[in-house]
Amino acid sequence: MSSSGDNTVVIVGASAAGLSAADGLREGGFTGPVVVLDAEAEPGYDRPMLSKGLLAAKETTAPASLRTREQLAEKNIEILGGHGAVGLDIDRRLVVTNWGEAIPWHRLIVATGVTARPVVTTSGMALPTLRTRADLDTARAIATSGKPVTLIGSGFIGLEVAAALRSRGVQVTVVGRCALPLVSSVGTEVALWLRDLHLAHGTRLELGTGISRVSETGARYAVRLADGRELHAETVLAGVGSDPATDWLLGSGVDLDGGVVTDSAGRTNVPGVWAAGDVASVPDPCGGHLRFEHWTHAIEQGRHVGLNIARGTTDPYTAVPYVWTEQYGHTLHLLGERQPGDTDVVIEGDVAAGEFVVAHASGGELHGATLCGRIRALRTFKKLLRAGATLDDALAIATPA
Amino acid sequence: MTSVTVDPGRCTAYGICVGIHPDVFSIPAGSPVAVVTRDVLTDDDLEDVQEAIRACPAQALTLVED
């Protein structure tokens, strides 16, 4: 490790955003020391596949490492495995680790990501979730036990896990607060199709009501719903969202509000401290702040922060948000951000047939698109959204057949 | 001329590249790896192909300049 923090960039977090920020620094021409703190002992890995291919697979393939030792050595990027940050001193420019080290930095990039929001039983046990490599082992053990699974949460993770478990013949019940899965992201028509897709594959859905508590009854669970009903469950997995991993920054002086608040360039309120990836709460087009938990966002915005620091620039990050989800052999692609109150217009194909392009717009202004099949339209729509196009522009280029 | 290659030893057919640039990358039904469907990249392709290279969790894509 470099002995002085004279121009050292310390990156806290070695997953997609942190590693991409390190790459961005080198790509931008930064030649000083780059030190990446990794709370997990093993190097960063391919997280999206935990709830996608890896849980569905019968073989126990490990998630792929994001970088080889050679790639890191070639770029002179130093990873400190098993070193998590526990505190930050912005006056003396030190980050304190779980080993008690005080590591000096000239620039700091916060890339600690998020942790799965815990659901705790009435006796105080946190229910298993799916966020880390260790969680995958637990979920796999549940899948191979053959016992029915109750999933709490009907967001991306809950639905992907349900589909993966059904493909292995496991009985699945999904409990979710929204009346239709992902309705705020994809609109009513696609959400109805998605609901029917799950029902057609034998997933039991208890939607439109959240849970009020989960209690342990011997080796089983009683899941009390908000409407007063009680479901009995053999095993339970929770996927109710995530919280930014910012405990170590409490009281540090770095502005926190549902994440690390940054400007469009990635800078926090503290000079020299930047944030990247899931943990960063970035300005959204509607004038608020928003966190994006998307694989490509972590990579592209992480790289962008690295480039800005290396070049001494404050260029805004403006890429079109993109996320995908795999369920029962269908891949849904979501571009942009559907806004509350948007109208959902089928631009191409047929939603019921599982092959479609649906635009999300209001007042003629295009906000996003949801695609399934028809992936050749992806780039076209990304370009339209980047250019601030209208719904009419989208309709004009569509091939409806 | 510029092209992109897929390392079949690393690729596991996640399909993220296909989602970023479906005119250049494809996963034919039953294929264990992604394939490149456009041999020579145009200037218009480059930005998205470079994003696909960065986004590949298996780091299986490489840009080749001849």
Image (cartoon, grey):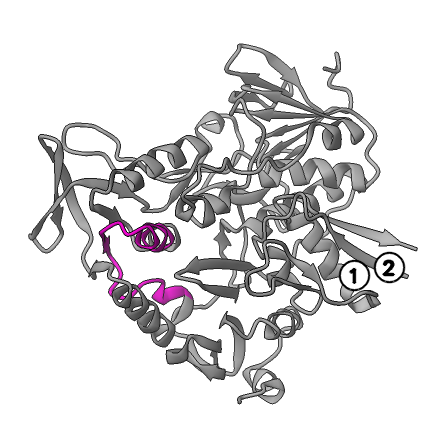
Q: Is residue A184 left or right of residue A222?
A: right
* In the image, residue A305 above or below residue A333: above
Q: Which numbered tag is attached to residue B46?
A: 1
Q: Which region of the structure is painted magenta?
A: A160-185
Q: Amino acid at mark 2?
A: Thr
Chain that bears disc 1: B
The image quadrant of residue A131 is: top left
* SS of the residue under disc 1: helix
The quadrant the N terminus of chain A occupies is top right
Expressed as whole percent of the image width and height from the top left, the position of residue A270 reads 61, 33
Mark 2 or 1 closer to N-term?
2
**Residue type highlighted by circle 1:** Leu
Asked if the stretch drawn in magenta spans residue A183, the answer is yes
- Residue A223 image position (x, y, % from top left): 13, 44
- Vertical side of A235 occupied by A209: above or below: below
Mark 2 vs mark 1: same chain? yes
Look at the numbered discs 2 and 1 and tell me whether their residues touch, using CB distance below 8 Å. Answer: yes
Question: Residue A37 versus residue A44: which sits nearer the camera?
Answer: A44
Label 2 – label 1 distance at C-alpha: 9 Å
User: Can you say whether A104 is above or below A111 in the image?
Assistant: above
**Could you tell me residue A116's position as x and y percent?**
38, 39
Q: Is residue A137 left or right of residue A32?
A: left
Marks 2 and 1: which is nearer the front?
2
How many numbered badges does the structure rendering display?
2
Relative placement, left or right, of A243 versus A90 is: left
Q: Residue at x 77, y 54 (%)?
A: B5
Residue at horizontal 34 percent and vertical 38 percent from the top: A139
Q: Where is mark 2, residue-wise?
A: B2
Give the secondary structure at mark 2: strand
The residue that appears at 28% across and 70% down in the rendered structure is: A196
**Foreground: A88 or A47?**
A47
